[in-house]
Image (cartoon, rainbow, N blue to C red):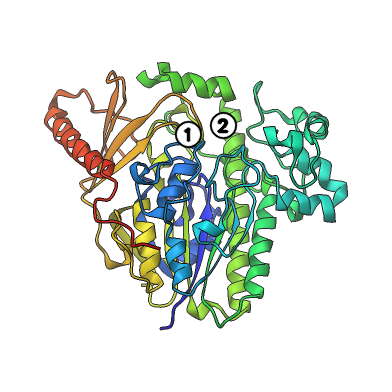
Amino acid sequence: MSQPNILFIMADQWAAASVGCFGCDVAGVTPHLDELARSGTRFSRFYANVPVCGPSRATIFTGRSPAAHGVWHNNIEISADTPLFTQHLRAAGYRTWGIGKFHFSPMQCYPPTDFGRLGFDEVSISEDPKHGPYLEWIRRDHPEWYPKALAMSWPMPYLQNYPPHDENLLPAWQEAAKKWVEPQKSTPFRNIFYPSPLPMELHQTRWIADSAIARLEKHDAAQPFFGVVSFVDPHDPYDPPTPYAQMFDAREMPPPIEQEWTREWCARDYAKFQDSMFGIKNFSAADWAQLRALFYGSCRFVDDEIGRILAALHQNGLQENTVVVFLSDHGDLIGDHGLLMKGPWHYDKTVRCPLIVSGPQIPQNEVCDALTCTLDIAPTIMGLAGVEAPPLEGKMLLEGEGWSEIALGTNASYVNTRGGCRTLISDEGWRLTLFPDGEYGELFDLKNDPNEQTNLFRDVKQQTRRLEMTERLVGALARAIYPFPRGEFAEM
């Protein structure tokens, strides 16, 4: 087979447990992803080594741990001398392009990083704040909707001198937000979940999908492509448009796992930070149900847009020579254990992510239960492309080799928020998590306690296991700290 096209589809903040074929307890959320899994291989134990947006994406595209790529939290730009696998693909003849969210630089930076130096021939970026090409498209082609779109954007400092028009957009944002966003506040602090005031056709998720379809339609078959389609959703705020905002009945939502704030860690600084940001400690059962209904509405919206993109592959005759990869950067707790989004805790819905690979010569309707992680993506993509990979930390997933253990780490869950932890996931099905202060830890038997409700960290019967896993975690972290454990990238 000639070099295949590779369509690399990403979602943001979407746990494996919230995808149908991975065991979602809400029906009808992901029909297109479920079909994609039937046509390919699904990886059931795929973990984010650094389950935070920017660090996770840096790990995915470099095949390196933060000790090597340097992106420890969301406010660090990936450095100019950090090699990405896209550079190797471009050098091997691929046309490399990207659409949507990348988070290779801090969100307060505009315009974002120089993607040419990172191995991309062309990009159309739309990050969480929504400024840039997407907002400019609304302003130019749909001016009547521009105030609502502006209201849903983020009030970043650069709006005082917004580069596309060299103007101060903050007053216009404040006026629009007061009219369209303030009345929808779901907590006393900020908007977390609400129906989008924009129609489906003008939502950021649709814009990303439409942009991807347009790129596929103009593909030159003489050159293989590596294309990134990276959705911002279902990341908070949970704001699907009609009809997705009404698609799932809040009254039918299964309740979160262990909803009450009764655990020891609830007194920790970061739990207090989450409550100060979002007020979730005072959420009622009805609040959680409505939030989850809107979250799953966002998931279904993304799934339907992925379905449109996959249909475009077929309509343009590209499916026979295109490998499709779907994954997310990390998960979202959506109320489990009384928590929201991500954080310095490594529960299943934070760290276990969906990964599906489908295409020519990929086993169909297969499930790989080997222990795998985001470090494995870079060598896997280069292997699919027939490009010789430099020595990397990860493994080629489709060769069937898994890990005996995986080390996970969180330093700051957003930018400079306090709280961090280190985790070992063992192939035997145990999770050990240690926190910096040493006063609290977690040890869970994932096979017999998949909901992670019985912490065995201080169980006298498990002290031998706790010590053994601590030693394994220290060893795994030591190997990750050495920046080139299997050699160095070849010179570009």
Circle 1 packing at 10 Å, graded few (<14), some (14-19), many (20+), is some
In the image, what residue occupies the spot 59% across and 64% down? 307
Q: Amino acid at mark 1?
A: Pro
Left or right: 28, with 329 as reference point? right
Q: Earlier in the sequence, mark 1 or mark 2?
A: 1
From what the image shows, is residue 38 above or below residue 63?
below
Residue for badge 1: 256
Q: Helix, strand or loop at disc 2? A: helix
Which quadrant of the structure image shows residue 172? Answer: top right
Relative image position of residue 473 (x, y in whole percent): 22, 37
Q: Does residue 391 sit above or below 234 in this rendering? A: below
Q: Mark 2 is on which residue type?
A: Trp
Task: Name the side, left or right, on which 359 lies relative to 155.
Answer: left
Q: Quadrant of the C terminus?
A: bottom left
Q: Is residue 331 visible?
A: no
Give me the residue at 55% from left, 53% from top. Answer: 29
Q: Quadrant of residue 163?
A: top right
- Circles 1 and 2, Cβ within 8 Å, touching? The answer is yes
Label of residue 288 in the image: 2
